[in-house]
Image (cartoon, rainbow, N blue to C red):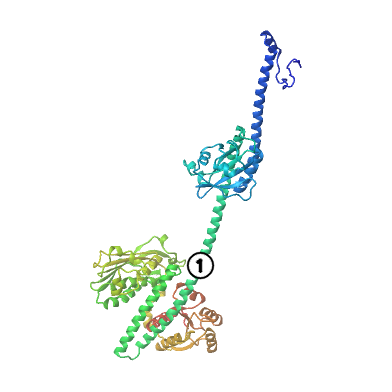
Amino acid sequence: MDSTGSNGWSHDDHTPLSKWQLSSDILIAFAYFSIPLELVYFIYRSQTAELDLEVGKIRKEEETLRHVHFLTDEIRSSLDRNTILNTTLVEISRTLKLESCNIWMPKLGGEVLELKYKLGYQEIPPFMIPVIDETVRLVCVNAGATVVSSGSALARLGCLYENDDGHVAAVRLPLLSTASFNCSPKIEEATMFAIMVLELPFGRLQWSKHELELIEAVADQVVVALSHATVVEESMQARDLLIEKNIALECAKREAELAVVARNEFLAVMNHEMRTPMHAIIALSSLLRESKLTTEQLSMIDTISKSSSILSMLINDVLDFTRLEAGSLCLDPQAFQLSNFLKEAEELVTPMAQSKKLPLSMAIRGMIPSNVCADSNRILQVFLNVVGNSIKFTSEGHIKICVYVEDADSESMPSELSSPRREVKHMFLHFNVEDTGIGIKASDLQRLFHKFVQADSSITRNFGGSGLGLAIARKFVELMGGKIRLESEGLGKGSTCKFFVSLGVVTDLESETLISPKKLQQGSDLLGLKVLVVDDNAINRIVTHRLMETIGCKTTVTDSGQKCLEILMTAGPGAYQILLLDLSMPEMDGFTVTIEILKRFKIGERPLIIALTANSDAHTRQRCFDVGMEGVLTKPISLEMIKIELSALLENFKYHGCSS
């Protein structure tokens, strides 16, 4: 042993001890206690070995940390599940110099594990292991890396060679979904696991603690990366599902819109095609009734008239209800005198009650406004339906009607009742119709407002009806901002129908602008009026021509819009007072004819243009007025009705100084 300086020694083929700086005090202490230098050297050599071990551990930890950081960067550089797992196999195998590495994924709802990823293999054998396998369960319950037996299914099916126990390790990879992040206390039970299996190269039989720790660290990073990928995958799936739903909804919307268009077109065609023959039947029946008939013939004509009226009402009910359900039927609010309306409504239902020898009374409770704004036709339709039902189902007793008004909240009223040109107050108009008829069971009170529903089958046999009346009445009442209900104490105890609708009370409208049709019928003279009838349907032309001739008009008929214009141009200004114009004609419809007439004639030189149409919807009516027509007559129409309508129209224009 040679001295190399005052602060340390070295020894032949051993590690230099220059790191250990021995002070002179320590040497003096050794010399004082007569400690041999060989012992001193042995002590320091032992300490040096321990220090080298510590340094080796630190270097291995640093190396492990570098590997983990590197693997983490590689693994988490992608948000694709397949890329993450394949990268994990490649990088951890390269780092640990493994013989093989594979990953088993859960399948069939987590009941089995399938060999899904294997290092260096494109086509992987379809190996499966049940999750109840003892080794699988051992790995899944252990949070760290587990050395598994070489005889286990995980080792035999996934590794390249058989060796003694100790050369195969496995670690679980929890597969979390977004549902797993709800902090549920049972998250461990609900989580499915994948398993990564790693095999040491041939000749190495044991895993070091350092390697197992590296595997655990990498597994933790894989779990984090997979959880991020799962969130992205589920977000993408949710987005794709949402896109699919939006596409499906858009397709359904287009199909619904096409269905609505097809239904509206069908309704328009059926409306026209059903009303046109009814127009001929009702009109010709009313004409025959004016001729000289025997008592038997008159009875047959009355039967035809009643049957055609019933059929016409059924057609109206079906078409109205279909439009109500489709939302295409709109209100047509107009100003009218409420007292006159109620009087005429009573006059309409009184003969119906008298025909069954039932006393009918109508009482108005309290004060009612003079001028109101609402759809009087729809109110009358509901009123006639309700009172008609009471009369139909009452054999003896009485019918009592009570009418009154009450103030209403203006915010809940339909906007159609307001007008910028009028000062409007909103009120409810109530009708209570009481009868002593057959009564209604409590269980049937609400059912009767459903379409095609009656209390029982015997009702249809004994009284008839389609079961649409109350369903339509409820739709109209609700459309007019009101409600309707039935009350009855039971069978044989009569019933009461109560309904109300909203009104706009007009306070600044001149009363002279509100005309009573019955008053007009008495004061108007239709004799000698020159009328031009335009209709492409030959039967309609014949029927309308005979109606007009019967009431004393001089009538000319033609079958097209173009011929109508030619006749008017040839005859000159003022030649015709009234033009009855069909709307549905080929080549040139009634709207186009009206526009052309307005272009060619001034208001005093042209006839009053009146649409004669089978379309009863408010949209068609409003369009007629928008293009410049003065009136609309809806088919079918009887002789008496056409007198009233034409008289009212002519008188109205006289009041405004517009008549030629």
Residue 602 x/y as whole percent: 53, 81
Residue 300 x/y as whole percent: 32, 86
Q: Secondary structure at mark 1?
A: helix
Asked whether residue 223 is in view, the answer is no
Q: Is residue 542 above or below residue 36?
A: below
| Residue at 44%, 64% in the rendered image | 415
Q: Residue 423 occupies which quadrant of the picture?
A: bottom left
Q: Residue 27 occupies which quadrant of the picture?
A: top right
Residue 463 x/y as whole percent: 29, 74
Q: Is residue 589 above or below residue 364?
A: below
Q: Is residue 394 above or below residue 165?
A: below
Q: Is residue 141 left or right of residue 91?
A: left
Q: Is residue 18 left or right of residue 604?
A: right
Q: Quadrant of the N terminus?
A: top right
Q: Residue 200 occupies which quadrant of the picture?
A: top right
Asked whether residue 46 is in view, the answer is yes
Residue density around tag 1, few if under 14, some if 14–19, many if 20 or more, within 10 Å: few
Q: Amino acid at mark 1?
A: Glu
Residue 70 x/y as whole percent: 66, 39
Q: Is residue 131 above or below residue 520?
A: above
Q: Nearer the viewer, residue 223 or 394?
A: 223
Q: Is residue 529 left or right of residue 565?
A: left
Q: Nearer the viewer, residue 486 or 6?
A: 6
Residue underneath mark 1 = 257
Q: Nearer the viewer, residue 426 or 330?
A: 330
- Total labels: the figure holds 1
| Residue at 63%, 48% in the rendered image | 121
